[in-house]
Amino acid sequence: MPVVRGKRTSLRPATPDDIDRLVAWHADPDVARYWDGETFTPAEMAERLAREDIDAWIVESADGEAVGYLQTHPGGLDMFLVPSARGGGLGPDATRAMAEHLLASGTHARVTVDPYEWNGAAIRAWQRAGFVEVSRGHPPDEDHRAAWLLMEYRR
């Protein structure tokens, strides 16, 4: 997988060298709360990185600092930034770059995200990246512990 570049960020494929970093990030309560409280052991993270239906990426700031995680899967993306990197536009830049990459490469006909309705900060960040609300009020299911909405990237 190539490096994907935004204006203020770059995304590189996650590797086994990132396992300890990802485990630590997920252990941070201010990250885990947005991922249903999930935390992982190094072995579990290695399994997650090996999934064939998910591509895992590390988000880096312009100075090369690892500041977040993004995963792509058929139909969409999921992402988080570490708390110290939030609020400066890095998230929208990274997600916009990835959405454009997926559409240009032909691997996705559309790119969606599915934030929880209670996560207003994420919804606003997705909107700044170019995602628009498609539907709301989806009940909890196997992938969601609370009501969520569907957003789609629009150029």
Image (spheres, grey):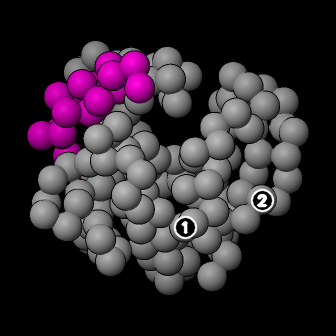
Furthest-front residue in view?
Answer: 87
Report the quarter where the N terminus lies.
bottom left
CA separation, marks 2 and 1?
Answer: 12 Å
Q: Is the magenta stretch mostly helix, strand or loop?
A: helix
User: Whole-percent x and y of residue 16?
Assistant: 17, 39
Q: Does the magenta stretch include residue 126?
A: no
Q: Name the residue under label 1.
A: 129
Residue segment shown in magenta: 14-30
Above-or-below relation of 69 to 61: above
The secondary structure type at the circle numbered 1 is: helix
The 10 Å Cα crowd at callout 1, few under 14, some 14 to 19, many 20 or more, is: many
The 10 Å Cα crowd at callout 2, few under 14, some 14 to 19, many 20 or more, is: some
Residue 63 as seen in the image, left or right of residue 105: left
Residue 49 in view, yes or no: no
Numbered mark located on residue 133 in the image: 2
Q: Which residue is drawn at 27% across and 67% down?
A: 10
Name the quadrant containing residue 98. Answer: bottom left
Residue 132 as seen in the image, left or right of residue 153: right
Q: Residue at x 84, y 37 (%)?
A: 138
Residue 96 as seen in the image, left or right of residue 62: right
Q: Residue at x 85, y 53 (%)?
A: 135
Q: Which of 82 and 144 is in front in this view?
A: 82
Three-letter amino acid code at disc 2?
Glu
The secondary structure type at the circle numbered 2 is: strand
Residue 137 in view, yes or no: yes
